[in-house]
């Protein structure tokens, strides 16, 4: 069974680190090990895995039934809003496991406040082991099942593009186009986006992570869409830039440069190439056309149960790509006050190339 196998991998690693208990705090990582996905907000959701005893999931009381029904085969312990979660956690851990001497924590995720509460509950324990590097490696290679899930999440991003492109008309604002996309997705059972949807019109797209607002699309401008959904626990992330009426020669030149960079990198993906080499292939295309300074971010990031994970496709990362690694290829050119273009697909490395999770065409679409 998939989840028990994953727990076993974590237990083996824990033993290798001489750590007694892993505290998994990142909700998407909890879902990776348990099959139960939840965003508990300010409440505590935690997975405690000991090296040699059955693990238990700790949730707000109102989630216990859902967690039990998710297929998680081990115990679920709930706490009420009027109870102190870390006191209960202490009690459960003391009853189930031997007195823990060393905890392993997700140091890139656990808040200082929660860490201090845990420390107060276990004043004699050490918190010296960081789970983060292990998680990054564990999540790096995706199984065939996971790739199918990423493909399904990608299909919804393609649907979102189709809806978004249809919503472009004279006077439509960025916010209105986003609302159309979300309305359609929600009506069809997709309730979460993997990040805040970006629709950026004209020069607003010159900020890679701009904030959509009341700007209306104008004729002879480009419109950038960057979006993705969470579908059955897996994320999609894709970007398309389209033209509203005939683009200028300059806009076309920028677009064609980004497209060439994106296609060159995507065509070069195969086992054996490094992350840095892939970044350079795309960057060289843009630099050779004189726009290198306007491509001001890495080529890509890993994707899976989270929208940004390993591997990082960036200069200096000599990681050799292997079959099953999944990441974005998203070159862009951003010239302040003028134009912004990004084109992004996430892909899975295959035996001899890659498959993209999104299939919306990348030739410049001109919407009349
Ligand atoms: Mn991305
Ligand atoms: Mn994106």
Image: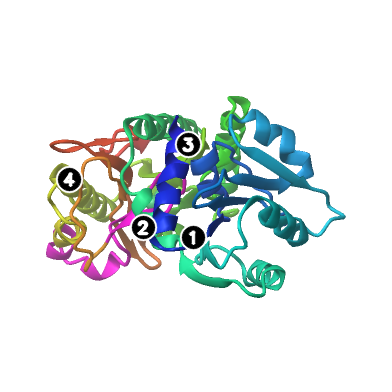
**Which residue is painted at 37% across and 40% down in the image?**
245
**Which is nearer the N-term, disc 3 or disc 2?**
3
Q: Is mark 4 within 8 Å of ligand 1?
A: no
65 or 367, nearer to the observer: 65
Q: Quadrant of the N terminus?
A: top left
- Relative to residue 253, is residue 62 drawn left or right? right
Reading the image, the residue beneath label 3 is: 4
> Which disc number belongs to residue 269?
4
Label 3 or label 2, whichever lies nearer to me, is 3
- Whole-Å distance between the Cαs marked 1 and 3? 41 Å
Q: Are marks 2 and 1 in contact (CB under 8 Å)?
A: yes
Q: Secondary structure at mark 2?
A: strand
> What range is drawn magenta here?
285-313
**Which residue is painted at 42% across and 54% down in the image?**
308
Label 2 or label 4, whichever lies nearer to me, is 4
**Which is nearer the N-term, disc 2 or disc 4?**
4
Q: Is mark 1 within 8 Å of ligand 2?
A: no
Q: Position of residue 185 (x, y in %)?
A: 56, 31
Reading the image, the residue beneath label 2 is: 340
- Whole-Å distance between the Cαs marked 4 and 1? 29 Å
**Which is nearer the N-term, disc 4 or disc 3?**
3
């Amino acid at each position: 069974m998939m989840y028990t196998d994953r727990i076993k991998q974590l237990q083996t690693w824990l033993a290798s680190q001489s750590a007694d208990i892993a505290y998994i705090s990142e909700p998407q990582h909890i879902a990776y090990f348990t099959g139960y996905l939840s965003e508990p907000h300010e409440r505590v959701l935690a997975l405690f895995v000991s090296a040699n005893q059955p693990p238990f999931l700790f949730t707000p009381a109102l989630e216990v039934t859902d967690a039990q029904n998710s297929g998680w085969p081990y115990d679920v312990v709930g706490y009420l809003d009027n109870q102190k979660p870390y006191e209960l956690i202490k009690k459960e851990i003391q009853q189930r496991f031997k007195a823990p001497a060393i905890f392993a924590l997700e140091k890139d995720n656990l808040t200082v406040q929660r860490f201090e509460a845990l420390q107060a509950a276990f004043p004699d324990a050490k918190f010296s082991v960081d789970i983060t590097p292990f998680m990054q490696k564990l999540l790096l290679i995706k199984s065939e099942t996971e790739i199918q899930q990423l493909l399904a999440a990608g299909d919804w991003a393609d649907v979102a593009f189709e809806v978004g492109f249809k919503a472009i008309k004279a006077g439509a604002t960025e916010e209105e186009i986003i609302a159309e996309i979300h309305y359609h997705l929600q009506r069809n059972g997709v309730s979460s986006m993997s990040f805040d949807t970006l629709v950026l019109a004209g020069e607003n797209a010159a900020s890679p992570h701009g904030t959509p607002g009341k700007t209306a699309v104008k004729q002879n401008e480009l419109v950038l869409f960057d979006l993705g959904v969470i579908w059955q626990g897996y994320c999609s992330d894709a970007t398309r830039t389209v033209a509203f009426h005939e683009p200028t020669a300059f806009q076309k030149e920028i677009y064609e440069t980004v497209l060439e960079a994106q296609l060159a990198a995507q065509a070069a993906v195969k086992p054996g190439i490094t992350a840095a080499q892939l970044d350079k292939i795309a960057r060289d295309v843009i630099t050779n056309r004189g726009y290198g300074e306007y491509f001001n971010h890495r080529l890509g990031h890993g994707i899976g149960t989270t929208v940004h994970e390993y591997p990082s496709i960036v200069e200096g990362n000599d990681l050799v790509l292997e079959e099953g690694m999944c990441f974005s290829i998203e070159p862009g050119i951003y010239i302040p006050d003028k134009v912004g273009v990004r084109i992004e697909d996430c892909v899975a490395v295959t035996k001899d190339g890659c498959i993209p999770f999104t299939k919306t065409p990348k030739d410049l679409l001109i919407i009349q």
